[in-house]
Image (cartoon, coloured by chain):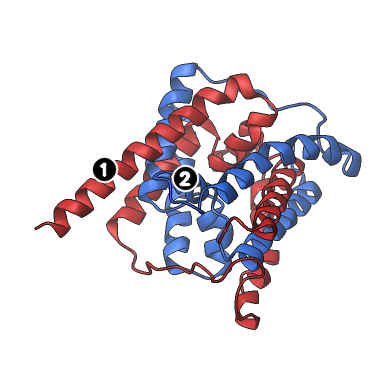
Chain colours: A red, B blue
Amino acid sequence: MNRSLPALLAAAASGIIFGIGLAISRMIDPQKVLNFLDFAAIPSGGWDPSLAFVMLGGVLVAFFGMRLDRLMVAPLAVPSFIRQVHFEIDRPIVTGAAIFGLGWGLTGLCPGPAIANLGLIPSSIALFVAAMLVGSWSMGQIMQWSANRRAGG
Amino acid sequence: MENFTPFSATVGGLLIGLATSILWVANGRQAGVSGIVGGIFPIHRGDVLWRVIFIVGLPVGAVLGLWIGPMLFSEVPVIRPTLALDPSILVIGGVIVGVGTQLGSGCTSGHGICGISRLSKRSFTAVLTFLATAALTVFVMRHVI
């Protein structure tokens, strides 16, 4: 029952606050992200450590927020928490993260800021978001097909 | 360290942490953007609308943040970001990000904020891995080619 009004309002609040955070921290600017990833610029003083402060701020709050379920029987708006199911460090997670980093470093864009930028620079970011959806969907199909093949023997 | 904006970066991060906490406490879901987007298809009844609403909230929030940010912090520029990338790079980069986040079960938000907060070893591994390949890519693009 994720369609209850409180659940939808919470999703809206979360998305909007997330977007505000991305814009205030300027993580919506791919150039700023690339300036963080450019560790070779440290000696010359051209490095921008801001992204690390965004992560720090986010983890500081979420460290407590993501533990509040311990004090609760159920989430406020839905019947149950959807918890992590995979714990093993397997090949897909390492390969996938390595591939993602390649695209992130190439463009300075990751999914959150890319989608948030649909509100700021829609005509220039649309191509990236469309390509990202195609990539994600295609990979999902391949993973589903390979899982089915394994299950079928 | 030119263009370093520690105050707005920290406050923006705190807001992202708050957004993540709201989605967990109210909806029992981890706020990983790639996971929320990727979970729309195939369509499961009752599991689509909240995803769409969260995703629409991101650009709405970005518009608000572009307006609020410079009011709160003099270090935040008033201008919209610019994309100085060739369309072919945008398409290739987009496909790579989509494939990688799907295979790696998450991106900077899901692994970087949610996973690290939960002290998940899987997410720590993912974050170190994508930071390494991203930094290597930037090094090659900016200092080698």
Q: Position of residue A74 (x, y in %)?
A: 60, 76
Residue B68, above or below B118: above
Does the image show residue B27? yes
- Element at label 1: helix
- Chain under numbered label 1: A
Amino acid carrying mark 2 in the image = Ile
**Is the N terminus of chain A in the top left, top right, bottom left or bottom right quadrant?**
bottom right
Residue pointed to by mark 1? A142
Tag 2 subunit: B
Q: How many marks?
A: 2
Q: Position of residue A63 (x, y in %)?
A: 64, 69
Q: Work out whether residue A57 can be spotted.
A: no
Left or right relative to B14: residue A101: left
Work out whether B74 lies above or below B116: above
Based on the displayed image, in which of its 4 quarters is residue A78 positioned? bottom right
Residue drawn at point x = 63 percent, y = 30 percent:
A118
Question: According to the image, label 2 marks what residue?
Answer: B40
Toward the viewer: A61 or B56? Answer: B56
Task: Name the residue at 43% across, 46% down.
Answer: B43
Is residue B122 toward the left or the right of residue A30 in the image? Answer: left
Density class for disc 2 (Cα within 10 Å; few <14, some 14-19, many ≥20) is: some
Q: Which of marks 2 and 1 is in front?
A: 2
With respect to residue A81, does A54 lie above or below?
A: above
Residue B98 pos. (x, y %): 42, 39
Quarter the C terminus of chain A occupies: bottom left
Choose top left, top right, bottom left or bottom right for residue A99. top left
Residue A44's quadrant in the figure?
top right
The type of residue carrying mark 1 is: Ile
Furthest-left residue in view? A153
> Residue A47 at x, y = what percent?
64, 40
Mark 2–mark 1 Cα distance, whole angstroms, equals 17 Å
Labelled disc at residue A54 = none
